[in-house]
Image (spheres, coloured by chain):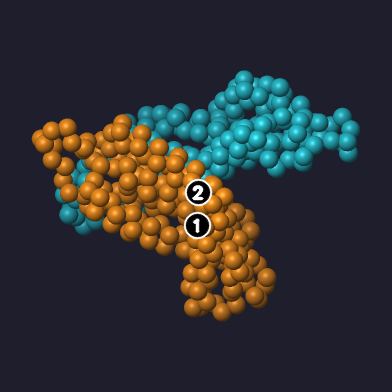
């Protein structure tokens, strides 16, 4: 069934999402230092709680989160410690996707939906950033650095899984899940029109 | 709804974990990615003969530019998400199988477009390539998954709501 405008609600929705995506991507990119700040705070909290012996500070500069560690850089740089930089944009591009989906659905209380969705997605971003840091020090770092981190083989496997999940699945799936959960009425209407 | 989401997340974790095993990498992911490179190259050579595929690498023979299709760009993760969403959703198996087959074609079809577009964007402008590669195409592929799943849900037969404790209504069971 088509709507009175001649397009199905789903087609109109998809077109609206595609129209909103450039806008939300631009806002996300330029507002990243502010938008990512809560995720950095959460990352800092979790890193210090779970890896307090490794992480001495977590700082954010624009969209880059820097982990200062207690790991020695090696004999070549006497006295130096390892710092790891993570591009948080890599784990937060689901935010503009979620915003475009929410704005395109144009449901009542969309602002509240944006706020709740953002709050729910912040931990997913923190997951990705922290897993990237752990992957750096446990897997891709030079052997003399990775050995200082002291992770067991099982822990290293878990870090690899957490990193892959946090980079390949979470950034895109989490926004879709949150959006679907918050727009069940919208989805019901789309299906009802089709029936 | 809770049953659907729990099943979806379990299937997602299971399929994704399976994908990461060395066995799946060797016998499924690598051949799949190689096939993707070959299909993309075959399409490109229809209008640009100076392109060749070697394994998972697509290269220009005229300027030497090459792209390697890595994890996240072979469409396997997006396909896994779609599979988990379709298999977890309460629907007749016949509909699920049709949805899985059509969904794989839809997701991989757009992924071929992603690979080809990135190959040319990379030769044109490296910054635009990075943006499209790391952010824009990732979102578009997942949007594709969501839309394919929504279209599939629309094709399902109506739910018998007064036939006892059957599957929940579509809206209360949706996820992607």
Which quarter of the rendered picture does the N terminus of chain A lie within? bottom left
Asked if residue B35 is positioned above or below residue A74 in the image, the reply reads below
Q: Position of residue A133 (x, y in %)?
A: 65, 35
Q: Position of residue B91 (x, y in %)?
A: 24, 46
Question: Can you name the residue that lies furthest to the left here?
Answer: B162
Question: Can you name the residue that lies furthest to the front here?
Answer: B23
SS at mark 2 in the image: helix
Residue under the point 55% across and 33% down: A127
Color used for chain A? cyan
User: Which residue is the site of mark 2?
Assistant: B19
Looking at the image, which is closer to me, A88 or A4? A88
Label located before the other in sequence (1 or 2): 2
Looking at the image, which is closer to me, B124 or A73? A73
Looking at the image, which is closer to me, B93 or A164? B93
Q: Which chain letter goes with mark 2? A: B
Asked if residue B95 is positioned above or below residue B1 in the image, the reply reads below
User: Which residue is the site of mark 1?
Assistant: B28
Image quarter of residue B130: bottom right
Q: Is residue B136 visible?
A: no
Asked if residue A95 is positioned above or below residue B73 in the image, the reply reads above
Do the numbered discs 1 and 2 sit on residues whose CB atoms are within 8 Å? yes
Q: Position of residue B37 (x, y in %)?
A: 53, 66
Q: Position of residue A168 (x, y in %)?
A: 52, 45
Residue under the point 72% across and 30% down: A149
Color used for chain B? orange
So how many labels did they put on this image? Answer: 2
Image quarter of residue B69: bottom right
SS at mark 1 in the image: helix
């Amino acid at each position: 069934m088509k709507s009175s405008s001649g397009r199905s609600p789903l087609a109109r929705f998809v077109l609206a999402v595609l129209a909103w995506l450039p806008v939300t991507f631009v806002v996300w990119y330029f507002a990243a230092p502010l938008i990512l700040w809560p995720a950095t705070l959460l990352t800092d909290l979790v890193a210090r709680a779970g890896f307090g012996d490794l992480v001495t500070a977590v700082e954010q500069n624009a969209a880059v989160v820097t982990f200062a560690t207690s790991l020695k850089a090696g004999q070549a740089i006497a006295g130096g410690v390892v710092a790891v930089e993570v591009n948080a944009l890599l784990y937060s591009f689901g935010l503009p996707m979620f915003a475009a989906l929410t704005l395109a659905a144009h449901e009542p209380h969309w602002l509240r939906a944006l706020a709740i969705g953002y709050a729910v997605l912040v931990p997913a971003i923190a997951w990705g950033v922290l897993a990237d840091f752990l992957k750096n020090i446990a897997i891709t770092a030079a052997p003399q650095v990775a050995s200082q981190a002291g992770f067991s083989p099982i822990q290293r496997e878990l870090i690899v899984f957490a990193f892959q999940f946090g980079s390949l699945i979470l950034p895109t799936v989490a926004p879709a899940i949150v959006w679907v959960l918050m727009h069940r009425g919208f989805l019901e209407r789309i299906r009802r029109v089709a029936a | 709804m809770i049953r659907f989401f729990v099943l979806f997340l379990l299937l997602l974790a299971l399929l994704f974990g399976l994908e990461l095993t060395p066995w799946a990498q060797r016998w499924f992911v690598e051949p799949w990615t190689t096939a993707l490179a070959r299909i993309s190259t075959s399409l490109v050579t229809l209008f640009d003969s100076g392109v060749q595929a070697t394994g998972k690498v697509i290269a220009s023979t005229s300027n030497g530019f090459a792209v390697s299709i890595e994890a996240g760009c072979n469409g396997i993760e997006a396909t896994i998400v779609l599979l988990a969403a379709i298999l977890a959703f309460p629907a007749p198996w016949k509909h699920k199988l049709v949805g899985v087959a059509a969904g794989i074609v839809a997701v991989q079809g757009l992924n071929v477009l992603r690979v080809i577009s990135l190959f040319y964007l990379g030769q044109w402008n490296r910054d635009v390539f990075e943006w499209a590669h790391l952010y824009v195409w990732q979102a578009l592929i997942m949007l594709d998954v969501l839309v394919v799943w929504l279209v599939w849900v629309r094709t399902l037969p109506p739910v018998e709501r007064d036939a006892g404790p059957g599957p929940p209504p579509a809206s209360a069971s949706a996820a992607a």
